[in-house]
Image: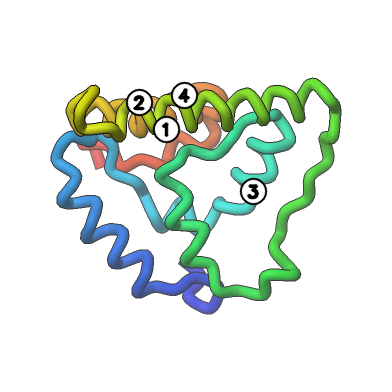
Amino acid sequence: MNTEEWDEEVINNLIAVEKEIKESTVTLNYEFITEKYFEMYQVALNAGTIMPYRFNPIGLAYIGDKHNRPTRMDNFDPEVKERLKNSYAKRNELQFKYANPNSDPVGRYEEFLDKEIYDFIEEFPQYKDIIITDEE
């Protein structure tokens, strides 16, 4: 991790919090994610795919020059915009459904968050190292 561009304390706090997420089967590889974050962001959005929700706090740890973020949105195709719009709407719907403790257990919400990560890896296998597996 380039500590000049990322708040190491925030990342370490995320790692500590993650150890408390018992329902989750995914352990994020923060070193890999911070190294590839903006590349993944650019590749995903240009393909019309949203980043997994669990990546949001990682993006908040970025402390580099915000005006020089290494991202460029190349694809402004209307179909890609529509796909992104629909993806965000579906995520909001599922988050509301799974986050509501009266309708579903918290574990279902964690499953939803994990599925987003697995779906991301399925679409972009070059980023499979975003999770730490038991073999490591």
Q: What residue type is labelled 1?
A: Ile
Tell me where residue 85 appears, x and y as whole percent. 67, 29
Q: Can residue 72 be seen from the camera position used here?
A: yes
Query: Disc 4 marks which residue?
Result: 119
Tell me where residue 102 appears, x and y as whole percent. 20, 28
Q: Which amino acid does label 2 sit on?
A: Lys
Nearer to the camera, 35 or 108: 108
> In this rendering, is residue 113 above or below 21?
above
Residue 39 numbered tag: 3
Query: Disc 1 marks which residue?
Result: 117
Between tags 3 and 1, which lies in front? 1
Q: Which residue is drawn at 45% across and 48% down?
A: 55
Would you say 23 lies left or right of 52 here? left
Which comes sooner in the sequence, label 2 or label 1?
2
Q: Distance between the Cα atoms at labels 2 and 1?
A: 18 Å
Q: What residue type is labelled 3?
A: Glu
Task: Give SS at disc 2.
Answer: helix
Q: Distance between the Cα atoms at labels 2 and 4?
A: 19 Å
Tell me where residue 33 appears, x and y as whole percent. 47, 51
Task: Give SS at disc 4.
Answer: helix
Between tags 2 and 1, which lies in front? 2
**Dots 4, 1 in contact, CB < 8 A:** yes
Task: Give SS at disc 3.
Answer: helix
Tell me where residue 66 appears, x and y as whole percent. 67, 70
Which comes sooner in the sequence, label 3 or label 4?
3
Between tags 2 and 3, which lies in front? 2
> In this rendering, is residue 37 above or below 114?
below
Query: Disc 2 marks which residue?
Result: 97
